[in-house]
Amino acid sequence: MRFNSFVLGALGLAASVMGAPTVEERDLSVADIINALGVGLVKDVNAFFTLDSLTTNVISVNFDVKNPLPIELTIDSVTSQAGLNGTVFATFTHTFPKPGLVVPPLGTKNSGTINNVQLPLGATAALSIVPFQELDLPDTNANVRAATILGALGIPISLTGLKQSDVPTTYDDMARISTLLFALMSCMLVGVFGAPSPKAELENRDFIGDVINLIGLGLVTQINAYITLESLTTDVISVDVDIHNPLLLELTIERIVSNAGLNGTVYSSFDHTFEKPFVIKPLKTANTGSIPNVKLVQGALASLDIIPVGKLDLITTDVYVRAATINGKLGIPIPIKGLKQADVPAKYELILS
């Protein structure tokens, strides 16, 4: 129904073009139709931060445009604002090289890289919205030609005041890592200069885990499980885990509490405190060494069924970290609670002797 209304609106627009109404009348009718019907033309947005972005407040983006009409559309230029909850975080104006951005009938086309996207509130403020992974487009203007043929000819249409909410947005690793670093630094500053009850504040500060979960920055790269003959009767195994540090700060892990499983079912559980500090250097991956006394809560025989899958989900994991340590010493204590990670590669070794 929305599609038919949009087609009728487009056909009406074409007729009005031939009848030469004012430009303002054309703008209002098409923008109003698209906004009222909720026919979002932007399918998704991809944003790319660099280290320079933190000082220049400039990033690059690309986005996928979907054409809901059975006629070819060609976009010559676009000016857009993007943000969240009424606040504008990014703006750009871009003219596409000839023949323009040609979007086939009922198809989708990527814009290609658009540089010089301005962050009017600054990169630090923009990083705060990365975990939400969506953007609103409160005001977009596009110069379009309808019914083009391979980008040529067509009826010029100026679309003014397009609006779209909740556009799925992905950010490159640099943006996600910067967001995590920003959250960690905020937590560290509160811990150092912080609150009336530092210990209580730190114990209740779970937002770091939420940030990591939202930006999908998986820290565990490999799980290795070791099953012995005794495991079949004790329902206890040992594991070791590869953990990646995506930050420019050294991390030292003191304790891990984890429940792992598959498809929402917990198969293993452990609470391990490291006798020696487990240090992960900046941008490196380190292995935990053997973690004993991992309990198979469904029993060893039931747990054997998931071995062929070759992966595990970390259903809930709490990690007690000291950030910005020096060779495992000093640092700011930060508990990271409620971590979740899906499809972690898992290897199993049966030790029969």
Image (spheres, rainbow, N blue to C red):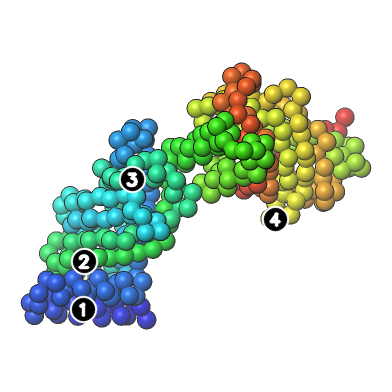
Nearest to N terminus: mark 3 or mark 2 = 3
| Crowding at mark 1 (Cα within 10 Å: few <14, some 14-19, many 20+) | few
Distance between the alpha carbons at the discs numbered 3 and 4: 40 Å
Identify whether 308 is placed above or below 73.
above
The C terminus - image quarter: top right
Quadrant of the rendered image containing residue 240: top right
Nearest to N terminus: mark 1 or mark 2 = 1
Q: Hey, which residue is sitting farthest front in the picture?
A: 196
- Per the image, the residue denoted by label 4 is 264
Residue shown at 36%/55% (left/top)?
A: 87
Contact flag, marks 3 and 1 (Cβ < 8 Å): no
Q: Nearer the viewer, residue 6 or 107?
A: 6
Indicate the amino acid at tag 4.
Answer: Gly
Residue shown at 57%/30% (left/top)?
A: 192
Which element type, helix, strand or loop, lies under badge 3?
loop
Distance between the alpha carbons at the discs numbered 3 and 1: 40 Å
Mark 4 against mark 2, which lies toward the viewer? 2
Identify whether 281 is placed above or below 216.
above
Quadrant of the rendered image containing residue 173: top left
| Crowding at mark 4 (Cα within 10 Å: few <14, some 14-19, many 20+) | few
Distance between the alpha carbons at the discs numbered 1 and 2: 15 Å
- Per the image, the residue denoted by label 2 is 159
- Per the image, the residue denoted by label 1 is 11
Nearest to N terminus: mark 3 or mark 4 = 3
Nearest to N terminus: mark 4 or mark 1 = 1
| Crowding at mark 3 (Cα within 10 Å: few <14, some 14-19, many 20+) | few
Indicate the amino acid at tag 3.
Answer: Leu
- Per the image, the residue denoted by label 3 is 121
Residue shown at 83%/36% (left/top)?
A: 293
